Amino acid sequence: MGCSGQVALLSSVLFAFGCGADGTNNPGGGGGDYDARPAASTPDASSPDASSPDAGRQISEVVRFIAMGDTGTGSASQYKVGNEVANICATRGCDFVVLLGDNFYDAGVAGVSDPLWQDYFEMPYAAIPDTVPFYPVLGNHDYGGSYLLVDFDGLGNDFEKGAYEVNYSDQSDKWTMPATFYTLRVGSVGFMMLDTNSIMWGNTDNGDQEAWYAGARAELDDAEWVFAAGHHPYRSNGRHGNAGSYESIEVLDMPIPNPVELLNGNAIKAFFDTHVCGTVDAYFCGHDHNLQWIDEPDALCGAQLIVSGAGAKTTDFESTTNNSLYEDDQKPGFVYAVIEGDTMTLEFIDEDGEVDFVQSVVHP
Protein backbone atom coordinates (compact mmCIF):
# COMPACT_ATOMS: atom_id res chain seq x y z
CA MET A 1 0.00 0.00 0.00
CA GLY A 2 1.34 3.45 -0.91
CA CYS A 3 2.11 6.12 1.66
CA SER A 4 -1.04 8.10 0.89
CA GLY A 5 -3.12 4.95 1.25
CA GLN A 6 -1.51 4.13 4.59
CA VAL A 7 -2.23 7.63 5.89
CA ALA A 8 -5.85 7.47 4.75
CA LEU A 9 -6.34 4.04 6.30
CA LEU A 10 -4.65 5.13 9.53
CA SER A 11 -6.98 8.12 9.72
CA SER A 12 -10.01 5.87 9.31
CA VAL A 13 -8.91 3.72 12.26
CA LEU A 14 -8.01 6.55 14.64
CA PHE A 15 -11.52 7.28 15.77
CA ALA A 16 -12.18 3.74 16.95
CA PHE A 17 -8.74 3.50 18.52
CA GLY A 18 -8.94 6.76 20.41
CA CYS A 19 -12.22 5.77 22.00
CA GLY A 20 -11.31 3.09 23.19
CA ALA A 21 11.00 2.51 32.15
CA ASP A 22 13.74 1.55 33.36
CA GLY A 23 15.80 1.73 36.60
CA THR A 24 18.35 -0.22 38.62
CA ASN A 25 18.59 -3.87 39.49
CA ASN A 26 16.80 -4.91 42.65
CA PRO A 27 19.32 -4.83 45.51
CA GLY A 28 19.54 -8.26 47.07
CA GLY A 29 17.48 -9.99 44.36
CA GLY A 30 13.76 -10.62 44.35
CA GLY A 31 13.10 -9.98 48.03
CA GLY A 32 11.36 -12.16 50.59
CA ASP A 33 8.07 -12.46 52.37
CA TYR A 34 8.34 -8.97 53.79
CA ASP A 35 9.29 -7.19 50.63
CA ALA A 36 6.12 -5.32 49.77
CA ARG A 37 7.68 -2.86 47.39
CA PRO A 38 8.58 -3.16 43.70
CA ALA A 39 12.01 -3.55 42.19
CA ALA A 40 12.71 -1.83 38.90
CA SER A 41 15.31 -3.25 36.56
CA THR A 42 16.43 -2.29 33.09
CA PRO A 43 19.55 -2.42 31.00
CA ASP A 44 19.35 1.27 30.09
CA ALA A 45 21.24 3.25 32.71
CA SER A 46 20.48 6.57 31.00
CA SER A 47 16.77 6.35 31.85
CA PRO A 48 15.13 8.07 34.84
CA ASP A 49 16.08 6.62 38.22
CA ALA A 50 13.54 4.03 39.26
CA SER A 51 15.16 2.54 42.35
CA SER A 52 13.00 0.41 44.58
CA PRO A 53 11.27 2.22 47.45
CA ASP A 54 12.13 0.89 50.85
CA ALA A 55 10.25 -2.20 52.03
CA GLY A 56 7.83 -1.17 54.76
CA ARG A 57 4.79 -3.43 54.98
CA GLN A 58 4.59 -6.87 56.52
CA ILE A 59 2.74 -9.20 54.17
CA SER A 60 0.87 -12.26 55.36
CA GLU A 61 1.54 -15.66 53.86
CA VAL A 62 -1.78 -15.26 52.08
CA VAL A 63 -1.48 -12.53 49.44
CA ARG A 64 -4.61 -10.56 48.57
CA PHE A 65 -4.85 -7.90 45.88
CA ILE A 66 -7.25 -5.95 43.70
CA ALA A 67 -6.86 -5.73 39.90
CA MET A 68 -8.80 -3.06 38.02
CA GLY A 69 -8.24 -0.87 35.01
CA ASP A 70 -9.57 2.01 32.93
CA THR A 71 -10.41 3.86 36.10
CA GLY A 72 -9.46 7.50 35.55
CA THR A 73 -12.77 9.22 34.87
CA GLY A 74 -14.00 10.70 38.14
CA SER A 75 -17.37 9.09 37.38
CA ALA A 76 -19.92 8.01 39.97
CA SER A 77 -19.05 4.40 39.13
CA GLN A 78 -15.37 5.02 39.85
CA TYR A 79 -16.35 6.26 43.31
CA LYS A 80 -18.67 3.28 43.87
CA VAL A 81 -15.98 0.82 42.82
CA GLY A 82 -13.48 2.62 45.05
CA ASN A 83 -15.81 2.35 48.03
CA GLU A 84 -16.33 -1.37 47.43
CA VAL A 85 -12.57 -1.88 47.21
CA ALA A 86 -12.29 -0.07 50.55
CA ASN A 87 -14.95 -2.39 52.01
CA ILE A 88 -13.09 -5.48 50.81
CA CYS A 89 -9.82 -4.18 52.23
CA ALA A 90 -11.47 -3.43 55.59
CA THR A 91 -13.40 -6.67 55.95
CA ARG A 92 -11.29 -9.28 54.17
CA GLY A 93 -7.90 -7.64 53.72
CA CYS A 94 -5.91 -6.54 50.70
CA ASP A 95 -2.18 -6.06 50.41
CA PHE A 96 -2.14 -3.86 47.32
CA VAL A 97 -4.02 -2.69 44.23
CA VAL A 98 -2.85 -3.17 40.65
CA LEU A 99 -4.09 -0.44 38.30
CA LEU A 100 -4.21 -1.74 34.74
CA GLY A 101 -3.79 1.48 32.78
CA ASP A 102 -5.83 4.36 31.41
CA ASN A 103 -5.46 5.82 34.85
CA PHE A 104 -6.31 9.30 33.53
CA TYR A 105 -8.73 9.98 30.69
CA ASP A 106 -8.63 11.36 28.14
CA ALA A 107 -5.00 12.36 27.64
CA GLY A 108 -3.09 11.54 30.82
CA VAL A 109 -1.80 14.16 33.23
CA ALA A 110 0.20 17.30 32.53
CA GLY A 111 2.51 16.83 35.51
CA VAL A 112 2.57 15.95 39.19
CA SER A 113 0.47 18.99 40.13
CA ASP A 114 -2.31 18.35 37.60
CA PRO A 115 -5.74 18.62 39.33
CA LEU A 116 -6.65 15.26 37.80
CA TRP A 117 -4.55 13.57 40.47
CA GLN A 118 -7.11 14.66 43.04
CA ASP A 119 -10.18 14.28 40.82
CA TYR A 120 -9.37 10.91 39.29
CA PHE A 121 -7.20 9.20 41.90
CA GLU A 122 -6.89 10.61 45.41
CA MET A 123 -10.56 11.50 45.94
CA PRO A 124 -12.19 8.40 44.37
CA TYR A 125 -9.94 6.18 46.51
CA ALA A 126 -9.85 8.28 49.67
CA ALA A 127 -11.65 5.55 51.65
CA ILE A 128 -8.84 3.09 50.91
CA PRO A 129 -6.16 3.47 53.59
CA ASP A 130 -2.71 4.72 52.63
CA THR A 131 -1.29 1.44 53.94
CA VAL A 132 -2.64 -0.19 50.76
CA PRO A 133 -0.27 0.76 47.92
CA PHE A 134 -1.42 1.17 44.32
CA TYR A 135 0.93 -0.26 41.69
CA PRO A 136 -0.01 1.11 38.25
CA VAL A 137 0.86 0.34 34.66
CA LEU A 138 0.25 2.77 31.81
CA GLY A 139 -2.41 2.69 29.12
CA ASN A 140 -2.77 4.44 25.79
CA HIS A 141 -4.79 7.30 27.30
CA ASP A 142 -2.06 7.91 29.89
CA TYR A 143 0.22 8.69 26.96
CA GLY A 144 -2.15 11.21 25.35
CA GLY A 145 -1.57 11.32 21.62
CA SER A 146 -1.29 13.42 18.48
CA TYR A 147 -1.41 12.80 14.74
CA LEU A 148 -0.39 15.23 12.00
CA LEU A 149 0.06 17.93 14.67
CA VAL A 150 -3.50 17.45 15.92
CA ASP A 151 -4.19 16.25 19.47
CA PHE A 152 -5.69 12.79 19.37
CA ASP A 153 -6.35 11.62 22.91
CA GLY A 154 -5.70 7.94 23.38
CA LEU A 155 -3.44 7.43 20.39
CA GLY A 156 -0.71 7.00 22.97
CA ASN A 157 2.37 8.51 21.38
CA ASP A 158 3.26 11.37 23.78
CA PHE A 159 5.90 9.23 25.45
CA GLU A 160 7.24 11.93 27.74
CA LYS A 161 3.98 11.69 29.71
CA GLY A 162 5.04 8.37 31.22
CA ALA A 163 7.49 10.13 33.52
CA TYR A 164 4.71 12.26 35.05
CA GLU A 165 3.00 9.24 36.55
CA VAL A 166 6.32 7.78 37.70
CA ASN A 167 7.27 11.05 39.40
CA TYR A 168 3.98 11.28 41.29
CA SER A 169 5.23 8.43 43.49
CA ASP A 170 7.12 11.12 45.44
CA GLN A 171 3.90 13.06 46.03
CA SER A 172 1.53 10.33 47.21
CA ASP A 173 1.44 7.75 49.99
CA LYS A 174 -0.68 5.43 47.82
CA TRP A 175 0.73 5.75 44.31
CA THR A 176 3.84 3.56 43.91
CA MET A 177 5.33 3.48 40.41
CA PRO A 178 9.13 3.26 40.19
CA ALA A 179 9.27 3.17 36.37
CA THR A 180 7.04 2.82 33.34
CA PHE A 181 7.76 -0.93 33.53
CA TYR A 182 9.12 -2.79 36.53
CA THR A 183 9.01 -5.93 38.66
CA LEU A 184 6.95 -6.25 41.82
CA ARG A 185 7.37 -8.83 44.57
CA VAL A 186 4.89 -9.29 47.41
CA GLY A 187 5.32 -12.40 49.52
CA SER A 188 5.05 -15.48 47.31
CA VAL A 189 3.76 -13.46 44.34
CA GLY A 190 5.78 -11.71 41.66
CA PHE A 191 4.57 -9.36 38.95
CA MET A 192 6.01 -8.32 35.61
CA MET A 193 4.53 -4.83 35.23
CA LEU A 194 4.57 -4.04 31.50
CA ASP A 195 4.21 -0.89 29.42
CA THR A 196 2.20 -2.43 26.58
CA ASN A 197 1.56 0.92 24.93
CA SER A 198 5.27 1.41 24.30
CA ILE A 199 5.52 -2.18 23.11
CA MET A 200 2.74 -1.57 20.58
CA TRP A 201 4.50 1.52 19.22
CA GLY A 202 7.93 -0.14 19.29
CA ASN A 203 9.09 2.83 21.37
CA THR A 204 12.08 2.64 23.73
CA ASP A 205 12.16 6.22 25.01
CA ASN A 206 11.51 4.89 28.53
CA GLY A 207 13.64 1.77 28.13
CA ASP A 208 13.87 -1.39 26.07
CA GLN A 209 11.46 -4.01 27.44
CA GLU A 210 12.70 -6.72 25.08
CA ALA A 211 16.22 -6.40 26.47
CA TRP A 212 14.91 -6.08 30.03
CA TYR A 213 12.39 -8.90 30.24
CA ALA A 214 14.48 -12.05 30.71
CA GLY A 215 16.71 -10.58 33.40
CA ALA A 216 13.82 -9.02 35.25
CA ARG A 217 11.84 -12.25 35.12
CA ALA A 218 14.84 -14.11 36.56
CA GLU A 219 14.59 -11.90 39.67
CA LEU A 220 11.23 -13.55 40.37
CA ASP A 221 12.33 -17.16 39.87
CA ASP A 222 11.79 -18.02 43.52
CA ALA A 223 8.23 -16.66 43.57
CA GLU A 224 5.57 -19.36 43.77
CA TRP A 225 3.26 -17.39 41.48
CA VAL A 226 4.35 -14.99 38.74
CA PHE A 227 1.85 -12.75 36.97
CA ALA A 228 2.11 -10.16 34.24
CA ALA A 229 0.10 -6.96 34.26
CA GLY A 230 -0.38 -4.59 31.35
CA HIS A 231 -3.03 -2.51 29.68
CA HIS A 232 -3.68 -4.17 26.33
CA PRO A 233 -5.26 -7.65 26.18
CA TYR A 234 -3.71 -10.72 24.67
CA ARG A 235 -7.20 -12.16 24.16
CA SER A 236 -10.50 -10.34 24.62
CA ASN A 237 -14.14 -10.52 23.53
CA GLY A 238 -14.44 -6.76 23.88
CA ARG A 239 -14.45 -4.11 21.20
CA HIS A 240 -10.66 -3.96 20.93
CA GLY A 241 -10.33 -7.72 20.46
CA ASN A 242 -7.29 -9.99 20.36
CA ALA A 243 -3.70 -8.85 20.02
CA GLY A 244 -2.78 -9.04 16.36
CA SER A 245 -6.30 -8.12 15.27
CA TYR A 246 -7.17 -5.09 17.39
CA GLU A 247 -9.90 -2.84 15.99
CA SER A 248 -11.01 -5.38 13.38
CA ILE A 249 -14.50 -5.01 11.94
CA GLU A 250 -17.13 -7.41 10.67
CA VAL A 251 -18.92 -7.08 7.34
CA LEU A 252 -21.78 -9.52 6.70
CA ASP A 253 -20.53 -11.57 9.66
CA MET A 254 -17.11 -11.83 8.08
CA PRO A 255 -14.17 -10.52 10.14
CA ILE A 256 -12.08 -7.91 8.34
CA PRO A 257 -8.63 -7.66 9.95
CA ASN A 258 -7.14 -4.27 10.69
CA PRO A 259 -4.18 -4.02 8.27
CA VAL A 260 -2.56 -1.02 9.99
CA GLU A 261 0.49 -2.61 11.59
CA LEU A 262 0.88 0.15 14.13
CA LEU A 263 -2.62 -0.29 15.58
CA ASN A 264 -3.56 -3.93 15.16
CA GLY A 265 -1.47 -5.18 18.08
CA ASN A 266 0.88 -7.39 16.09
CA ALA A 267 3.81 -6.00 18.08
CA ILE A 268 2.11 -6.87 21.37
CA LYS A 269 1.28 -10.39 20.20
CA ALA A 270 4.87 -10.90 19.04
CA PHE A 271 6.27 -9.64 22.36
CA PHE A 272 3.99 -11.89 24.40
CA ASP A 273 4.58 -14.93 22.21
CA THR A 274 8.34 -14.43 22.32
CA HIS A 275 8.95 -13.25 25.87
CA VAL A 276 5.91 -13.74 28.13
CA CYS A 277 4.63 -17.13 26.94
CA GLY A 278 5.68 -19.82 29.42
CA THR A 279 6.98 -17.35 32.02
CA VAL A 280 3.77 -16.29 33.85
CA ASP A 281 0.81 -18.01 35.45
CA ALA A 282 -1.70 -15.29 34.56
CA TYR A 283 -1.96 -12.03 32.66
CA PHE A 284 -4.13 -9.20 34.05
CA CYS A 285 -5.12 -6.39 31.69
CA GLY A 286 -7.75 -3.78 30.88
CA HIS A 287 -8.39 -1.70 27.71
CA ASP A 288 -11.78 -3.30 27.10
CA HIS A 289 -14.22 -1.87 29.64
CA ASN A 290 -15.70 -5.08 30.95
CA LEU A 291 -14.80 -8.13 33.04
CA GLN A 292 -13.62 -11.39 31.49
CA TRP A 293 -11.92 -14.62 32.45
CA ILE A 294 -10.90 -16.05 29.10
CA ASP A 295 -10.89 -19.85 28.85
CA GLU A 296 -8.42 -20.65 26.09
CA PRO A 297 -5.92 -23.19 27.49
CA ASP A 298 -3.75 -23.10 24.37
CA ALA A 299 -3.35 -19.30 24.43
CA LEU A 300 -0.21 -17.75 25.93
CA CYS A 301 1.17 -21.15 26.92
CA GLY A 302 -1.73 -21.85 29.24
CA ALA A 303 -1.63 -18.66 31.33
CA GLN A 304 -4.91 -17.51 32.86
CA LEU A 305 -6.15 -14.48 30.90
CA ILE A 306 -8.03 -11.88 32.93
CA VAL A 307 -9.56 -8.67 31.57
CA SER A 308 -10.53 -6.22 34.32
CA GLY A 309 -11.16 -2.91 32.57
CA ALA A 310 -14.48 -2.00 34.19
CA GLY A 311 -13.12 0.14 37.01
CA ALA A 312 -15.23 3.17 36.11
CA LYS A 313 -17.44 2.34 33.10
CA THR A 314 -18.45 -0.46 30.76
CA THR A 315 -18.65 -1.09 27.02
CA ASP A 316 -20.50 -3.90 25.29
CA PHE A 317 -18.91 -7.08 24.02
CA GLU A 318 -18.52 -7.23 20.27
CA SER A 319 -17.04 -10.68 19.80
CA THR A 320 -17.51 -14.28 20.81
CA THR A 321 -14.13 -15.32 19.45
CA ASN A 322 -12.84 -16.61 22.77
CA ASN A 323 -14.38 -19.07 25.19
CA SER A 324 -14.74 -17.69 28.69
CA LEU A 325 -15.33 -18.88 32.21
CA TYR A 326 -17.02 -15.58 33.01
CA GLU A 327 -17.75 -12.32 31.25
CA ASP A 328 -19.90 -9.30 32.00
CA ASP A 329 -20.22 -5.98 30.18
CA GLN A 330 -23.03 -4.39 32.17
CA LYS A 331 -21.65 -3.60 35.62
CA PRO A 332 -18.47 -1.76 36.58
CA GLY A 333 -16.34 -3.69 39.01
CA PHE A 334 -12.99 -5.29 39.77
CA VAL A 335 -11.18 -8.55 40.44
CA TYR A 336 -10.24 -9.60 43.97
CA ALA A 337 -7.43 -12.17 44.04
CA VAL A 338 -6.46 -14.36 46.97
CA ILE A 339 -3.27 -16.39 46.67
CA GLU A 340 -2.78 -19.05 49.32
CA GLY A 341 -0.06 -21.60 48.76
CA ASP A 342 -0.67 -23.35 45.45
CA THR A 343 -4.22 -21.99 45.05
CA MET A 344 -5.37 -18.78 43.35
CA THR A 345 -8.97 -17.69 43.87
CA LEU A 346 -10.39 -14.87 41.77
CA GLU A 347 -13.64 -13.09 42.60
CA PHE A 348 -15.36 -10.77 40.15
CA ILE A 349 -17.10 -8.11 42.26
CA ASP A 350 -19.36 -5.36 40.92
CA GLU A 351 -19.80 -1.76 42.02
CA ASP A 352 -22.64 -2.78 44.36
CA GLY A 353 -20.43 -5.22 46.22
CA GLU A 354 -22.01 -8.34 44.74
CA VAL A 355 -19.71 -11.28 44.05
CA ASP A 356 -20.83 -12.25 40.56
CA PHE A 357 -18.35 -15.06 39.93
CA VAL A 358 -15.68 -16.91 41.89
CA GLN A 359 -13.34 -19.72 40.89
CA SER A 360 -10.10 -21.22 42.15
CA VAL A 361 -7.22 -22.72 40.19
CA VAL A 362 -4.36 -24.80 41.56
CA HIS A 363 -0.81 -24.10 40.48
CA PRO A 364 0.31 -26.91 38.20
Image (spheres, rainbow, N blue to C red):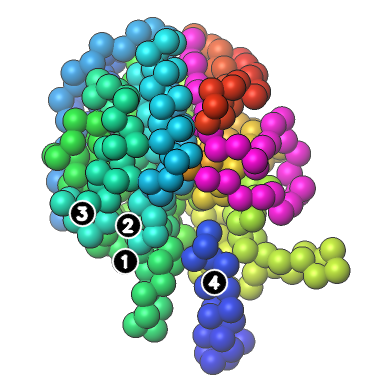
**317 inside magenta stretch:** yes
Q: Is residue 238 visible?
A: yes
Residue type at mark 1 is Asp
Vertical relation: 176 (above or below) 264:
above
Residue type at mark 3 is Asp
Label 2 near label 1: C-beta < 8 Å?
A: yes
Residue drawn where x is 39% and y is 59% of the image:
106
Q: CA distance from mark 4 to mark 1?
A: 17 Å
Tell whether 95 sits left or right of 154.
left
Q: CA distance from mark 1 to mark 3?
A: 16 Å
Residue type at mark 2 is Gly
Q: Which mark is residue 108?
A: 2
Q: CA distance from mark 3 to mark 2?
A: 10 Å
Q: Which mark is residue 304?
A: none
Tell whether 51 sits left or right of 11.
left
Q: Earlier in the sequence, mark 3 or mark 2?
A: 2
What residue is disc 4 on?
A: 15
Label 1 near label 4: C-beta < 8 Å?
A: no
What residue is disc 3 on?
A: 114
Q: Earlier in the sequence, mark 2 or mark 4?
A: 4
Q: Which mark is residue 158?
A: 1
Disc 3 packing (10 Å; few <14; some 14–19; many ≥20)? few
What quarter of the picture does the C terminus occupy? top right
Q: Which residues are magenta?
A: 313-340
Q: Secondary structure at mark 4?
A: helix
Q: Residue furthest right?
A: 252
List x then y, in percent, for residue 249: 71, 66
Tell whether 281 sits left or right of 128.
right
